[in-house]
């Protein structure tokens, strides 16, 4: 993370501690200049690190903001983990997501925005960070019997990779060929490796998928479709 060196360069670090610029007062009807960051409401952690582009809202350009900062805080950490810096009238910036980030709700607090020497009011926003998951389906047919195997995977932060999602509860769904409606077929409860198998009888050709749920620390996912 290069948050502190960046902020030190613009005078927002004192003694190694992140120090936000003085906050602007809430705008009045007569002085409605504001600035927002359009950060995603959810982040999915599924690789050791990746870069995310965060644009400003159009209100920042309308207010002619030339510098703005936001800092991301998590309840488990006292100091800011992430910082979004918009310098020299930039309307977007990049941040780095790392898989050691705490899971949960992050608060993006204003760190100061200005047009020259005029402070501009900023909005607070939030991002929900959870682990990524994915599912896969394979189907085989023997006469009228169809066997459907599912695999559920989740990201493992400590190992920096995907592993089998033990005990995943999901649902195998099907739709008739040429239709758009998905219907429930069988509830899934994966084994210790994330696998599950189900066999049933049908002569119809159908599309199949497995849907994994969102839970407190993981985002749900829907597998690619197979036809059998």
Image (cartoon, rainbow, N blue to C red):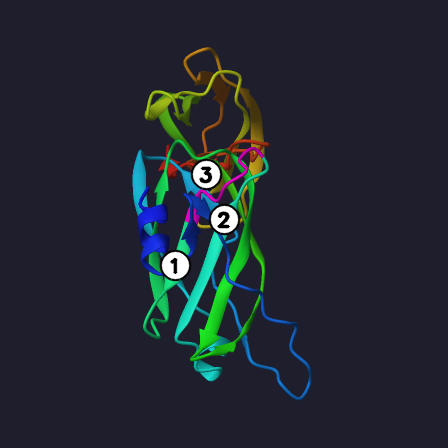
> What's the distance in space between the residues labelled 3 and 2, CA to CA?
29 Å
Determine if the magenta segment contains residue 81: yes
Which residue, given by chain and number where applicable, does mark 2 sit on?
Answer: 72
The percent position of residue 66, horizontal first and vertical second, equals: 39, 75
Q: Nearer the viewer, residue 58 or 17?
A: 17
Q: Nearer the viewer, mark 1 or mark 3?
A: 1
Q: Residues within 10 Å of mark 1 (few under 14, many from 20)?
A: few
Please identify the dominant SS of the magenta region.
loop
Nearer to the camera, 11 or 28: 11
Cα distance in 3D space between marks 1 and 3: 46 Å
Residue appearing at x 46%, y 48% in the figure: 18
Disc assigned to residue 222: 3
Mark yes or no: residue 177 visible: no
* Residue 118 coordinates in the image, percent (x, y): 50, 79
Q: Quadrant of residue 143?
A: top left
Q: Residue at label 1?
A: 11
Q: Dot 2: within a 10 Å radius of its alpha carbon, few (fewer than 14), some, or many (20 or more) residues?
A: many
Q: Which residues are magenta?
A: 76-82
The residue that appears at 53% across and 60% down in the rendered structure is 110
How far apart, in angstroms, are the residues tagged by discs 1 and 2?
A: 18 Å
Mark 1 or mark 2, which has the lower sequence index? 1
- Of marks 1 and 3, which one's residue comes earlier in the chain? 1
Q: Is residue 212 above or below residue 195?
A: below
Residue 200 among those drawn in magenta: no
Which residue sits at x=51%, y=57%? 20
Residue 22: x %, y % from top left:
55, 64
Which structural element holds mark 1? loop
């Amino acid at each position: 993370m290069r948050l502190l060196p960046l902020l030190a360069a613009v005078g927002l670090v004192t003694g190694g501690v992140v120090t936000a610029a003085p906050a602007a007062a809430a705008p009045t009807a007569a002085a409605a200049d504001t600035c927002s960051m359009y950060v995603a409401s959810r982040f999915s952690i599924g690789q050791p690190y990746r870069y995310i582009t965060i644009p400003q809202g159009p209100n920042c350009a309308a207010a002619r903001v030339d510098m703005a900062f936001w800092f991301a805080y998590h309840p488990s950490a006292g100091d800011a983990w992430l910082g979004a810096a918009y310098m020299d009238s930039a309307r977007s910036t990049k941040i780095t997501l790392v898989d050691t980030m705490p899971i949960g709700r992050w608060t993006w607090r204003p760190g100061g925005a200005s047009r020259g020497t005029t402070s501009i009011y900023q909005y607070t926003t939030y991002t929900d960070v959870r682990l990524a998951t994915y599912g896969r389906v394979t189907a085989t047919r023997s006469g009228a019997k169809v066997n459907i195997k599912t695999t559920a995977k989740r990201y493992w932060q400590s190992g920096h990779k995907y592993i089998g999602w033990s005990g995943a509860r999901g649902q195998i769904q099907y739709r008739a060929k040429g239709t758009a409606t998905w219907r429930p077929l069988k509830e899934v409860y994966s084994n210790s490796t994330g696998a599950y198998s189900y066999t049933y009888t049908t002569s119809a050709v159908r599309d199949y998928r497995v849907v994994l749920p969102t839970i407190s620390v993981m985002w749900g996912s829907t597998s690619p479709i197979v036809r059998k």
